[in-house]
Amino acid sequence: MTNQTVSPPLLPWENKPLTKGFSRWRRHLPAYLFVFPYVLVMLAFGLGPGLYALLISFADFSTGVPIYFAAGFKNYLAVFNDFRFSFTLGNITEFLVISVPLGIAMVVVLAILLQMRPGRLTTALRTLYFISGAVTGPVLVLVAIFMLDPSISPFQALLKGMGFELLNDVIYSDTLPVLFTLLGFFSGAGLWIAIQYGALEAIPKELLEAATIDGCNAWQKVLHIKIPLIRPYIIYQFILIFAGNVQLFVEPQILGGGNNLGVGGNVPMVWSPNQLAYNFAFEMGNFGAASALSLMLLVVGLGAAYLIIRWTGFFNIKT
Amino acid sequence: MSKSDNRRPDFHSTFLQRWRYFWMKNVGDTGVLGFILRWGVLLLFALYFLVPILWLVLATSKNAPQLLELKPLAFGSFERIWEAWHRIIAYQNGEVLLWFSNSVKYAIWALVLSLAASIPAGYILAVARFPGRHLVLWLTLITMLLPPSALVLPMFMELNLFHLVNTQWAVILPSAFFPFGTYLTYIYYASSLPPELLDAARVDGCSEAELFWYIALPLASPLLGLLAFINFTTNWNNFFGPYVLLNNNKLFNLPVGIQQFVTATSALRPGFNPSPGIMVGYQQAEAALFGLIMVVPVAIVFLIAQRYVIGGAFTGSVKG
């Protein structure tokens, strides 16, 4: 996961003079055999569905069966005109604004604090931070409901101190972006702390020793050496976290899904754009609008990635 | 300060020397304030990560009134755990065990298929030049940014074409695509497999397949451990795909099963009047135990793969 790639040397079967057509293709046969299964699954379950989504976003589903290219931009307009569109867009924007910078900052801070002076206790802490990554999806929501219920939570003193008495006081529309941030951090931070820790370990020791001799203290080394050097990993994290968080689905879906969770009324059935896409497809039968919305989310994720890559010069593949 | 002051204290060390050693080792150039701040933050987050898991474990031992009355981190009784276990096993005639075995089956199939596809591809992308190599690399980067949930609707329609929706293959086949694994393998070999090693083996008469099998693969064992862990965790927790692509209870994996359990039973609100159709008699302990059944296998796999997962394998250095 470095941002530089090495151009491989020519292999013996590549040194033969270039010929055209079949024999040229055969020269690379071993390489193609190695890469073939992967390309196959990529086409079937990555690119294929992506392109198919593009196709059905222009298809008309009003009769129940798709009529391709019949809808024009009607599906996209249907998404824009849906009364829930701006609501979900506002929700996800608020969630992204809170969760992305805060999540990245805290991960980097924890990785730096752990790696500063490694010892037995920091190793144990690193394992502890990581193990909570085992709690994801529905179990994460389950644990969250328990943790946020002031009547049974181990954090009840804190919750009651903040004036919350019932689960419904804690989980309502204004707190959802913060709650989803806390949930995501609980289950996702460990892996990223491990990645950033690995990046910090890879910084040459001589560099840090030289800084010490020049009179840098530990905090100056963090600010002027460590953070600039792990920047590519921070950007990498930004891209993947942003693309992942745009697609928020499981947490609001489960929280809004059942009245017997004790929070049903406070969490709308459709809170995030990805839920709206799901709703278009499986509640309203409009696969065209669902695809159109999915693609819009995709474009947002890719757009953010592209901007940050251009802005920072990340992914300079020198081959 | 002379060099001997930094020595590890032994039997003859004076108190001052011991103190100085302790100070240098633990505080050093972070300063006293920095020392307090650092451990304050680290331990605060330790609570944030530890307490919910600890609570989940302890909650299985308490019944609903005890959850309210006892201290949140108090222990109830072993009988209650046993009772919760029996109720979970009895839920819909033992469907939980079926879901567990489904989860294991899906995760192992996904692991085998995705590593079999990703690792050879990542390897050859790193060591050989061939037309289309750039294209595969870029497409890998792009598809890596697309979380599976964006593709699930077209995937549904695609699988529907082959009549695979609502079969186990609807979950297994899509998870064979693991671009993250290919990319990490590519970076690993590109940055750390010495080309001379492969050349030497070629001179000795190794075929390309033998090079991969006998040289490249053994060198990548830390990477394999890491990828296996990430892949297993991802697939074990796979919710969105099975949720959309399966509607037969018998095919559910644990994440979909647990969602069904908490919405179909009174487990999270045992004291309230249930809505019609909700199964009563279940308490929080059952839900917590169900959650633990999902968490424990990941924790076990994590402990096995630990030295790869947090041992800095991300930096990808092959010594040899």
Image (cartoon, rainbow, N blue to C red):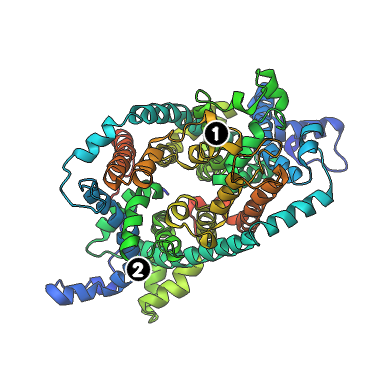
As drawn, A256 above or below A315: above
What residue is shown with label 1?
Answer: A264
Neighbor class of circle 1 (other Cα within 10 Å; few <14, some 14-19, many 20+) is: some
Please provide percent x and percent y for residue A206. Answer: 52, 41
Q: Which residue is drawn at 74% across and 30% down?
A: B23
Q: Do the residues labelled 2 and 1 touch (CB within 8 Å)?
A: no
In the depicted view, which residue is nearer to us: A34 or A57? A57
In the rendered view, does B151 fall on the left or right side of A229? left
Task: Determine which of the numbered discs, if any, sits on residue A145 in the image.
Answer: none
Residue A171: quarter of image: top right
Q: Which amino acid does label 2 sit on?
A: Pro
As drawn, B121 above or below B262: below
Question: Mark 2 or mark 1: which comes first in sequence?
Answer: 2
Please provide percent x and percent y for residue A285. Answer: 32, 47
In the depicted view, which residue is nearer to us: B290 or A221? B290
Neighbor class of circle 2 (other Cα within 10 Å; few <14, some 14-19, many 20+) is: many
Secondary structure of residue under mark 2? helix
As drawn, A63 above or below B196: above
Residue B131: quarter of image: bottom left
Q: Is residue B99 something one can see in this rendering?
A: yes
Q: Disc 2 vs disc 1: which is toward the camera?
A: 1
Please provide percent x and percent y for residue A157. Answer: 73, 24
